Amino acid sequence: QVQLVESGGGLVQAGGSLRLSCAASGRTPSRNAMGWFRQAPGKEREFVATISWNGAVTSYADSVKGRFTISRDNAKNTLYLQMSNLKPEDTAVYYCAARSTTAAGLRAWEYDYWGQGTQVTVSS
C-alpha cells in the first residue's frame, strides 16, 4: 500500500505560479511511477503529467506542456508539480497518483493509489 497526501493548492491570479507537493509513504514509494491528474467541476478526471520511478521519463498533457514541470525527490518520497503561467482553465482539484510499477503512465486506470486532492483556483 502507498499513501499519498497532496498540498500546495490555493487561489492564484492568471499568469501566476504554484507548486504542488505530494508526500508518499508506505511500501517503497520510490519504486512507483507517479502522476498528476485534475478534475474540474462537471468534467471528467484528466491526465496532467507523469514521471517514471527514477525521473528519467516524463510526459505532459498538451494543455500544460511548457507551463508545468513534474519532478520527484525519492530521498524525500515527494512528488512535485511546478505550475507557471496559470490560466483560469487550469482551475480544478489536482490529484497525485502512484502506479504499482516503475513505468510512467498516461491513463487514470493505470494508477492504483490516489491522494485526496488539492484545490487550485486561477482567477482571471
Image: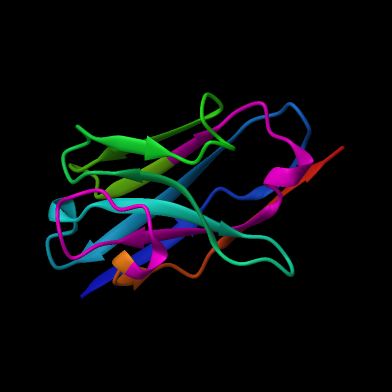
Q: Position of residue 62 (x, y in %)?
A: 53, 36
Q: Position of residue 64 (x, y in %)?
A: 56, 35
Direction right: furthest residue: 124
Q: Position of residue 37 (x, y in %)?
A: 49, 56
Q: In which quadrant will I find the C terminus?
A: top right
Q: Is residue 121 left or right of residue 21?
A: right
Stretch of the chain drawn in magenta: 81-109
Residue 22 against residue 74 in the figure, above or below: below
Q: Which residue is drawn at the image coordinates 59% and 37% (left, top)? A: 63
Residue 112 against residue 14 in the figure, above or below: below
Residue 48 or residue 11, whichever sits in front: 48
Residue 69: image quadrant is top left
Q: Is residue 100 magenta?
A: yes
Q: Is residue 7 left or right of residue 28?
A: right
Residue 51 against residue 41 in the figure, above or below: above
Q: Which residue is drawn at the image coordinates 18% and 46% (left, top)? A: 53
Q: Is residue 79 left or right of residue 82?
A: left
Residue 42: image quadrant is bottom right
Residue 103 or residue 120, whichever sits in front: 103
Q: Position of residue 38 (x, y in %)?
A: 56, 57
